[in-house]
Amino acid sequence: MADTDEPVTLIFGAGYSGRPYGRHLVARGQTVLGTTRSPGKAEDLKNAGIDPLLFGGETVDDALATAIGSATDLIVSVAPDAEGDPVLRAAREQIAAAPRLRWIAYLSTVGVYGNHDGAWVDERTSPRPVSERSRQRVRAEHEWQNFARERGVPLAIVRLSGIYGPGRNALVNLAEGRARRLVKPGQVFNRIHVDDITGALAFLADRRHDGIVNVTDDCPAPPQDVVAYAASVMEVDPPPEIDFENATLSPMARSFYGENKRVSNAAIKALGYAFRFPDHRAALERMWAEDSWR
């Protein structure tokens, strides 16, 4: 059990978004524990300085129960399913009884806003999800909000836009020959670099923020423009444009294009957060210059 004054963060789902935040806290000298479904990925967490725990979404073993009891901060980055939020379903009792818990962050998605035909939305916009996965997110948000009220602990609902960063970006897609410039007139998407997820979480945790906040970039942009800009950074020819209506896409990929909106980040900036990567242009240029895109 940790010293009573020491902050301890438990990350449910220490994957692409959660693991960098854990590394950031470890660098600050904090104790971080993180769950993974795969024993094979436990070594990756160890290498990041994060104490690994197994959690498959069904049960809580003794090691995880002890970790919950020691945690001051809880980060939830686990996707919901048709039955609700897996973390609350499996660990509600342990989290409710956690003696040191001071703050929870639930990582959600801007997909909960649904389609607004390219209009701006912010935290005051009522969710009207289109896809089943976004409807599940809304239900999970409500579950966590109800739980946090009952538990009497501040909860940040962190709505993220399309996540990119090292290994997941238009530069990688171009280098591997997978980039496509799909064109659907009027379509835009927001994005967020994984480093700004880390930065925003640290900012919100320090303030024990309570409420909904969008963590997204300044520049909702057509997806084909992002690919073209990445090509200009790499000094290669961009792939040809493809009409969306004639493109071969999986049902899930096509469903993303059914949601068209511009998501405002004014609220978190008003709180004082400064984005490291305010738009995709700055991010692609920096990653290319630093060779951090792979």
Image (cartoon, rainbow, N blue to C red):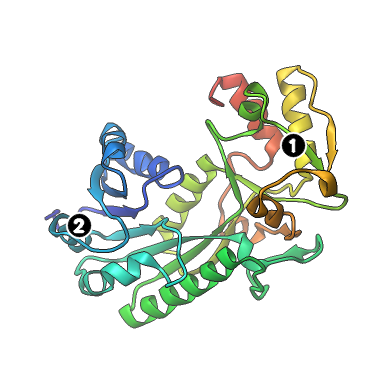
Going by the numbered disc 2, the residue's amino acid type is Leu
Say which of 277 and 206 sits in front. Answer: 277
Amino acid type, mark 1: Val
Q: Which residue is mark 2?
A: 64
- Please state which of residues 286 and 245 is positioned toward the viewer in this rendering: 245
- Rounded to the nearest whole Å, what is the CA distance between mark 1 and mark 2? 41 Å
The local secondary structure at tag 2 comes to helix
Between discs 1 and 2, the one toward the N terminus: 2
Placement of 169 over or under 100, stated as above or below: above
Residue 180 shown left or right of residue 132 in the figure: right
Q: Position of residue 17 (x, y in %)?
A: 46, 46
Numbered tag placed on residue 278 in the rendering: none
- Residue 138 screen position, x and y as percent: 54, 72
Q: Tell me which residue sits at (27%, 68%) in the image.
A: 91
Please say if 141 is above or below 149: above
Residue 94 position by quadrant: bottom left
The residue shown at (45%, 52%) is: 201
Q: Nearer the viewer, residue 257 or 7?
A: 257
Question: Which is nearer the eye, 253 or 284?
Answer: 253
Among the 4 quarters of the image, the one containing residue 239: top right
Q: Residue 202 at what x, y percent from top left? A: 43, 50
Quarter of the picture holding the N terminus = bottom left
Q: Residues within 10 Å of mark 1 (few under 14, many from 20)?
A: some
Q: Residue at x 28, y 55 (%)?
A: 55
Image-based side of 22 in relation to 141, left or right: left
| Count of labels in the image | 2
The residue that label 1 is drawn on is 226
Q: Is residue 261 left or right of residue 197?
A: right
Residue 66 locus on image (x, y percent)? 15, 59
